[in-house]
Amino acid sequence: MPLHRIAIPTTGPGLYEFTAEVDNFARKVNPAEGVLTAYVRHTSCSLVIQENADSDVQRDLAEFFRRLVPDADDPSMSWLWHTTEGPDDMPAHIKAALTQTSLGIPVEDGRLLLGTWQGIYLFEHRHRPHRREVVLHLAT
């Protein structure tokens, strides 16, 4: 049951595709069938599977979440208690709670069984750059 770690540098809020790295790992292990788990080791970003054919999808999704959960300095967020790590921190935790920190993807003949337009993304919710770590595990 192999494990692999991927470091994903981010420059601010948005979606960062890393499908190719996950696909390379699955091909290297090359199981007849299995389930690949991707898990992000942070509480202020998340993982999503989203369309990767039109970058407008990623921009619209990021904008939706920005409007759904604005920064703590927005008057609508004055109820927040956790504000010591900056105005984007608690909203980032909320966004991560609304999405997911792990994904399960079926694998067959060493290939991810993603749909035609699906890509795997780290969804960064913080404003400043980070180095995020995603752990991959392939169970056969």
Image (tube, grey):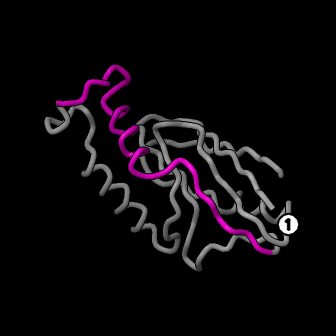
Q: Would residue 20 be counted in the magenta stretch? A: no
x, y percent for residue 38: 64, 52
Q: Residue at x 60, y 38 (%)?
A: 41
The segment highlighted magenta reads: 79-108
x, y percent for residue 118: 55, 71
Label 1 residue SS: loop
Type of amino acid at the residue the image marks with label 1: Asn
62 and 95: which is toward the camera: 95
x, y percent for residue 110: 81, 70
Q: Residue at x 45, y 34 (%)?
A: 128
Q: Which image quarter holds the C terminus?
A: bottom right
25 and 55: which is toward the camera: 25
Residue found at the far bottom of this picture:
116
In the picture shown, does residue 76 fall above or below 79?
below
The image quadrant that residue 109 belongs to is bottom right
Q: Report which residue position mark 1 lands on.
A: 30
The image quadrant that residue 82 belongs to is top left
In the picture shown, does residue 115 fall above or below 11?
below
In this image, 112 relative to 100: left or right?
Answer: right
